[in-house]
Image (tube, grey):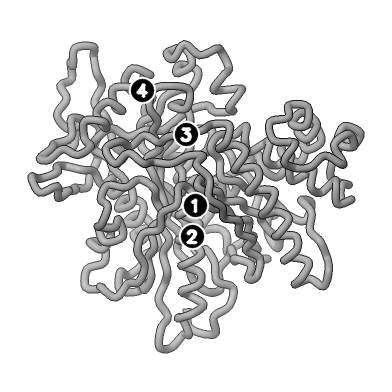
Amino acid sequence: MAGSVTDVGIHAMEVYFPRLFVDQTELELFDGASAGKYTVGLGQMQMGFCADHEDVQSIMLTVTAKLMEKHNIDPKSVGFLAVGTETIVDKSKSVKTQLMQLFPGNGDIEGVDVTNACFGGTQAVFHAVDWVYANVDGSRENRWALAVMGDIAVYDKGPARCTGGAGAVALLIGPNAPLVFDRGLRAVHMQSVYDFYKPRMTSEYPVVDGALSVQSYLSALDACYQLYGAKYAKITNGKHPDLSNFAAVLFHSPYARLVQKSLGRLAFHDFVSGRHSHLSSLDQLSAFRGTPLNATYGDKSFEKAVLTASEQLFRAKTDPSLLFARRIGNMYTGSLYGGLCSLLLTQSPSELVGRRLLLFSYGSGSAAAIFSLSVSTDASRLQGLLQSAKEAAYRLDHRVKASPKQFARALEMREQLLGKAPYQPHALCMDDNDGEGMMHFPLFPDTFYLTQIDEKFRRRYERSTNVQQNGH
């Protein structure tokens, strides 16, 4: 890492998700929902979930340890670590401090937790990039930065429960990277809105205004794309971008159908700006040319028009990034970066090298940003990232399917966990014949898990070896 600090970005990536998942088609039937409501209406296939022996700290420990081990990162070579999460287990002690057990002999690591719904992960990434530019000089300071993000997304019984998920992502940030964060091209939009929030300290479940949440997401997207275009033009002598300039367009994904609608909105912006050679069915868009953007939210005829005009664009530039989102669900802060891993897995490096990727991050409340990554012109530099993506895909195909009833039982366990001390996770103690043939709650090998909460609410963790059933 010696030398001048340029091209700060992502050198390595690790993705973690739980071993258990529920099938969305089966969940539709279990919930009494109409056939296709979750799978077609939302575009979801499966949803990962955790029982009560995994919490946000255990999944962050797992993903961070695996990143460092796979890439032979010396704990003393890390100078910054920020965590993005909205899954809070302590109102004072940060998850980052829990991760410090992975860095023996190195207390000189800047960074703490960042919290704002699903946006905290992106802000942690921005902090990591900025720390490298501000501190690394190749002589006095030449250490790595880490950004770790993840959540366990759960909802109370009702229509939103199917939009949960769980997972974590760790990024290794440094100079001369194969995926470079473009400087001067962060377009941010912040506002105060009560679309999704968690005011109840005794519950993991959020308060959600579904319609307002979608509108807030889309209005932030509109604002960020317009601002990104203005900043892009400023640094390129007046050249305005459109979606054809990017090898891929990635989004934070609460559910896949919203992502498809979001790309359609960006396509509409391109159309209005006169940059539409990459679009089809322009006559349908023409009917909305003079319509104020705030009048299009929730307009089904508008949605149909933009979806039709952008369908081929979606298949080429965005759909490849949705593999994990469709099969894991919403990882909250990790969602966008799971999309990046999916893209690397499903797109040929030859289609990405030397190109830009456009990314949209959103967190309710709300905080949002559009930014871009430039891909190295040397395809060989992507091999490490591609290998990590392939390993994640292998794990994805070797998970254990649980029944919707077992999924509901796991969430009941998590409800019992809150505010209890002392506490031992039920998932570690369950009998093979638990009344209705309740399965154990298996973990992947080398996964950190919660073993107990003592009488002073201190959490204890161990690491599995080849755990197939209970952790002991």
> Which callout, 1 or 3, points to the residue nearer the camera?
3
Q: CA distance from mark 3 to mark 4?
A: 26 Å
Disc 1 target residue = 119
Q: Which mark is residue 175?
A: none
Amino acid residing under circle 3 = Val
The first of marks 3 and 2 along the sequence is 2
Is disc 3 in contact with disc 4, using a CB cutoff of under 8 Å? no
Amino acid residing under circle 2 = Gln
230 relative to 133, above or below: above
> Which callout, 3 or 4, points to the residue nearer the camera?
3
Image quarter for residue 256?
top right
The first of marks 3 and 4 along the sequence is 3
Residue 397 seen in the figure: no
Circle 4 residues within 10 Å: few <14, some 14–19, many ≥20: some
Q: CA distance from mark 3 to mark 2?
A: 23 Å
Is disc 1 in contact with disc 3, using a CB cutoff of under 8 Å? no
> Which callout, 4 or 1, points to the residue nearer the camera?
1
Instruction: Give the residue displayed 54% in from the left and 22% down from the top.
Output: 38
> Which callout, 3 or 2, points to the residue nearer the camera?
3
Instruction: Give the residue displayed 56% in from the left and 45% down from the top.
Output: 252
Is disc 2 in contact with disc 1, using a CB cutoff of under 8 Å? yes
Disc 2 target residue = 123
143 relative to 124, above or below: below
Depth check: 169 or 415 in front?
A: 415
Instruction: Give the residue displayed 26% in from the left and 73% down from the top.
Output: 106
385 relative to 17, above or below: below
User: Element type at marker 2?
Assistant: helix
Q: Position of residue 86 (x, y in %)?
A: 39, 48
The first of marks 4 and 1 along the sequence is 1
Depth check: 438 or 97 in front?
A: 97
